[in-house]
Image (tube, grey):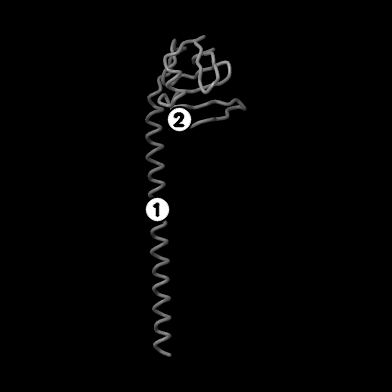
Amino acid sequence: MDNAQQSANEEGKSSAGDKYETGRAMMQIERDRAAHQLQEAIQLKTVLDQIKSEMAPERISFGSLVITDSKRIFISIGIGKLMVSEIEYFIVAPTSPLGKALLGLKVNDRLTFNKGVMTVREIL
């Protein structure tokens, strides 16, 4: 009986130790994930800091807000759709397919993209 109790006690200690180690491992994974997200955010901020605000650029470039007849597109970092004051904006990277297609266009240029046609109305 003493042997059975001792085995049970050892099993309990082992299980508790395993739970402790598992908890520590999970916390380390979460910490690593948060550190990775922070590093990505810092890199994105560095990219955003490179945007130069010019008055009405002639051609679409990095940092341009493009108003087409159907969309509002900001060329910066690829974060997707964003609603501002109930207006939908597409935030795309210059390396994205849409960003690449827009770079260098001027007001009144037409673009065929995803089976649709857009006309550039303004570049801000």
First in sequence: mark 1 or mark 2? 1
Which residue bears the numbered disc 1? Answer: 29
Res 8 → quadrant? bottom left
Query: In the shown orientation, is residue 82 left or right of residue 53?
Result: right
C-alpha gap between disc 1 and disc 2: 26 Å
Query: In the shown orientation, is residue 83 left or right of residue 103?
Result: right
Residue at the image position 38 percent from the left and 43 percent from the top: 36
Mark 1, other Cα within 10 Å: few <14 / some 14–19 / many ≥20: few
Three-letter code for the amino acid on which mark 2 is drawn: Gly
Residue nearest the viewer, comparing 57 with 96: 96
Which residue bears the numbered disc 2? Answer: 78
Three-letter code for the amino acid on which mark 1 is drawn: Ile
Which element carries disc 2, helix, strand or loop? loop
Q: What percent of the width, then of the height, locates residue 25? A: 38, 58
Residue at the image position 44 percent from the left and 23 percent from the top: 99
Res 27 → quadrant? bottom left
